[in-house]
Amino acid sequence: MTSRAIDPVDTIWLNMDRANNLMVIESLMMLEGQVDWDRFLTVLQQRVLGVYPVFSQRAVPARLPLLPPHWEDDTDFSLSRHIHRATLPAPGDDAALQEFVSSQLSTALPRDRPLWQIHLIDGYGQGSAVYSRLHHAMADGMALMQVLLSLTDEVADPAVVPSPAVVSDRGPLSALVHLVGAAGTALLDAPRLLTAAHTGDVVKTAWQSAGVTTKLLRAHNPNSAVAGEATPSKAAIWAPPIPLADIAALGHRTGTTVNDVLMAALAGALSTYLGNGTGSGATPDIPTMVPVNLRPVDQPLPRELGNRFALVLFSLPSSLDTPFARLAETKRRMDDIKHSPEAALTLGMIQGIGRTGPELERLVVDFFANKATGVTTNVPGPRTPRYVAGSRISGMLGWAPESGNQALGTAIFSYDGAVSVGFKVDTGVISHPEELVAAFVAEIDALCHLATTG
């Protein structure tokens, strides 16, 4: 039996589970046509379980005080304890899939086995869906998305199936790593930002660091209809895919990036939602946390996986009155963060928290988590179609967990020429998530229309 200590940073997320906000990364693949599930399980065994040991190991508490918990082989491991089959009720539309996913969001992963589940879902229209639930202690969402995408192929029936353990510079999985990137890569290139050459001289870096520290300490989540005490009641909801070409063209016309446009649209959606009688008074700027990848995107994942990311606090300009004003201010704020050492500082903070005890971890994590309404991820996925067990993927989404009293998770995922946007909300706080989805789509439409006619 093999055993290894759990990294201090991974231990943070292992200890952070609570009934009103679980540390589970949720992901969804929608598939065209009926899937050969036996073939899927074979691929899962070969490309995931046979490569990453943590998928067959359970988290075991330390036997002595002050020692870290450890990963230990699950001697009773069986796929049947992790794979669940389901069939959606007719008509098997997005609403039915959303209801199924929502029913799972507050279910904790059993601690007596490896910390993951995959739901194989039939009856989704004429196709199927793969819904994965993976604990944050195993790895960050960026790494786990790479793991899940290693299940996919460039063609329906590949003649040769590459192994993630031997990624080559020219292989399809290496290209996939470049395409997937990570949540936040459209916002920041963290490894570059962590170099002294980028941040400048010592005095400049110290000055910037002092400003960031002040920002993090003074920041707060304002009272609004998307803030409140977290509850176990959760729901997932998403919009129809949006053509990526439309977003890119809008960015080109306005001198902004795709990421600027999408974050500005989120600010506009919140502005509309908070102004539709669900909030009171002037609409405030809404802060959200954005994960930033710290792994080199041109290297394969380590077998041990683990967490390698930082967080930045981004204030969405939802207080501004017009779509273009929100877009211009989003770009300005994004550009400021790109030249800030915030990612480096939060990385150090996370590493420091991981070396304290569970009680102090919770206090510090809650202190910073409660400064934001939730977590926003923006993942640039594969640009060309991918296949799972012979079935074409029609869409993908993935949500990071919320902590503290965070109530709004936003997932932005681009794939095969389209952008999918979904929300994971605490319905005890955000009672009308469908209005938020409609407002996001309307904001994109308004921006595209104004850019065309302006």
Image: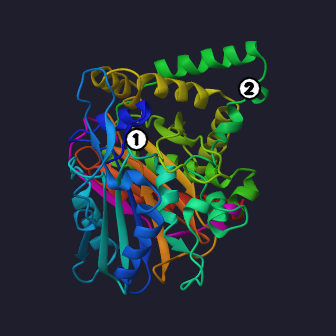
Q: Quadrant of residue 199?
A: top right
Above or below — where is 94 with respect to 273? below
**Residues shaded magenta:** 226-248
Give how far across and how far down residue 44 sits, in percent: 41, 69
Which secondary structure lies at badge 2? helix
**N-terminal label among 1 and 2:** 2
Give how far across and how far down residue 338 sits, in percent: 68, 36
Amino acid type indicated by mark 1 = Gly
Do the CB atoms of the residues marked 1 and 2 lie less than 8 Å apart? no
Amino acid type indicated by mark 2 = Thr
Give how far across and how far down residue 154 sits, in percent: 60, 77
The structure residue drawn at horizontal position 49% and vertical position 76%, both measured from the top left corner, is 393
Pointer 1 residue: 374
Which secondary structure lies at badge 1? strand
Q: Quadrant of residue 402?
A: top left
Report the front residue among 434 and 6: 6
Can residue 1 be seen by looking at this rendering? yes
Give how far across and how far down residue 19 sits, in percent: 20, 42
Can residue 279 be seen by looking at this rendering? no
Residue 99 in the magenta stretch? The answer is: no
Pointer 2 residue: 199
Horizontal relation, residue 159 to residue 16: left or right: right
The structure residue drawn at horizontal position 54% and vertical position 49%, both measured from the top left corner, is 302
Q: CA distance from mark 1 to mark 2?
A: 28 Å
Above or below — where is 219 with respect to 2? above
The structure residue drawn at horizontal position 29% and vertical position 25%, both measured from the top left corner, is 358
